[in-house]
Amino acid sequence: RSIMDEFDYDVCVIGAGPAGFAAATRCWDFGKSVCLVEKGQLGGAGIHSGALSSKTFWELSKDYQNAIRKDRGYIAENVRLDFSQVVACVERAADEKVQQMSRQLQELREPRPDYPGSIDLKIGTAKFIDKNTIHLEGLKPGQSGKIRARNFIIATGSKPRTLDSIDVDGQRIITSDHVSRLKDFPKSLVILGAGVVGCEYATIFSNYGRTKVHLIDRAPRILPFEDEDISRICSGNLEKKGVSIHHQAKLLSMKVINDRVEYVIEHSSGGKETIRTDYALISIGRIPNTASLDLEKAGVDVDERGYIISKNTQTSTPSIYAVGDVTYDVALVNVAEIEGRYAAEHISRESLQDLSYDNLSSIMFLDPEVAAIGMNELQAQEKQISYKVATYDYSLVNRAVAMRATEGFVKLLVRDDDSNEMLGMRALGVHASTMIEAASLIIQHGRPACDLGELLHPHPAITEGLQECVRMLSDSSIYKPHVFKSELRLSRISFDKTDAASGEANTPERRLHRANAKK
């Protein structure tokens, strides 16, 4: 091995989800001997009850929606829907990823004559004894015992957050971990939490049309961190499919009575309402899996919620790193993988720059799909950044027209100065995620947004909507805002304290009104 005899491995990675797997394979790239510890299923929640499984569920629900449409020149008859077969398809998708991961780990298990790297997978539960030692309680014969490593990477992920006042029995009151255990589509379901995950499951179950969905939202509108135009369309589509959204509702109680879920909410008016459903899904965030690691024995600091305190993935113990959901960073698979790779590079002295979270992108699997990168208008206004914004409706994008899916828009924000710096983009509609890469590249390299305007985009493609947003900002779009007043928006929002010409207060609202009045 490449290390001294007192260590069994160069690196021990605890957790084989997306973050841990990425960290282990990147350590292998640098010729490290790696022990990869996993207490459950290879792939973790990211594969089995999180991103991959829920998105497969969503894709299948969209396929079903398209299969029963009657506006495409054909009518499909006798379309049968079987929940157990839907779940089986979701599980096959997860199994495919597990097989891919297993195949690679098998090949990388032993060092080659020409290469020292290796990854040794061990199944069991890890607890720290000191900063360089864990005790592994193995689930297989002969795998229990101590493991010593020069460095550790903690990637144990997270689990659904619950409330002490609610008894999550996994039968009637469930979390995302239990969805695949359902025997059939519920006749009725209440979802507590109107964040991204809660709204995604509301979308999935309402897409199939077999479940009356209730959504408890303590805020005035769903997705309150996004601009109102996105929230309005997503909320409206859920309601069109029969979802009852309890806006500004406070949950007073939730319990199982006579094999049904009874919950009581208090409305913003003060009125109380009791509703009964077959099932309840608790979707109020996640908490880190750190409590059982005995981190204090390794000198690793955590905050009051159990998140590991780290800077650039390095914890209070320099030889121990933390990546993914165990840290209080953005809980996304792509972020977890980047952090895992970064930690491996830091250990190998191959990474000197700080991690940056300024160019994050995400996809929300709602109806329709939402893609986001950089700032939205809410964030720009909170920071009082003067900006220009262009919005281009999907009804003018040829690919969306051809797909008969014209609901949605592309929105682009740029700094209102000579730099033409792209601040952020939002896209809502079919293939929305296809526009993220182009916007990401421009933001990452600090290029002006106008660079996207004259690229030779393929036709027909949804990305042409983004191109036309850029052209609108330079007054060179093919369709003109003063003609398509409902489909196009071109506005300027300024945070100058006074208007230079009139001396009047120049609020965002006044400047927006004035900009639109000129069109």
Image (spheres, rainbow, N blue to C red):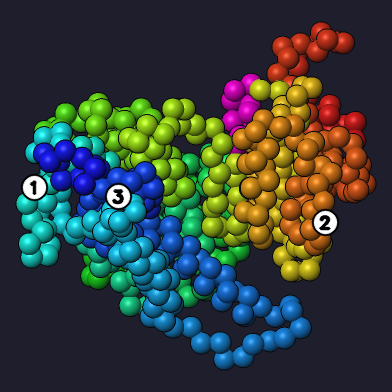
Image point (47%, 48%), residue name: 334
Q: Secondary structure at mark 1?
A: strand
Q: Residue 145 at x, y = what percent?
A: 6, 51
Answer whether residue 51 is magenta in the image: no
- Give the image location of residue 361, x and y in percent: 56, 44
* Camera-side mark, 3 or 2: 3
Q: Position of residue 101 (x, y in %)?
A: 36, 63
Q: Which residues are magenta?
A: 374-384
Where is residue 287 drawn, in percent x and y?
29, 44
Name the kind of residue labelled 1 in the image: Lys
Which one is earlier in the sequence, the residue at label 1 or at label 2? 1
Is residue 441 among what the camera can see?
A: yes
- Asked whether the beta carbons under mark 1 and mark 2 sit within 8 Å of each other, the answer is no
Marks 3 and 2, how far apart in space?
56 Å
Residue 274 can be seen, yes or no: no
Q: Which residue is mark 3?
A: 116
Say if the magenta span includes residue 376: yes
The amino acid marked with disc number 2 is Leu
Crowdedness near tag 1: few (<14), some (14–19) or many (≥20) residues, C-alpha within 10 Å:
some
Q: Secondary structure at mark 2?
A: helix
Residue 146 - label: 1
Residue 311 left/right relative to 292: right
Quadrant of the rendering where the C terminus is positioned: top right
Q: Quadrant of residue 9?
A: top left
Mark 2, residue position:
396
Image point 62% across, 80% down: which residue? 68
Callout 3, which amino acid? Pro
Q: Residue 15 or 117: which is nearer the viewer?
A: 117
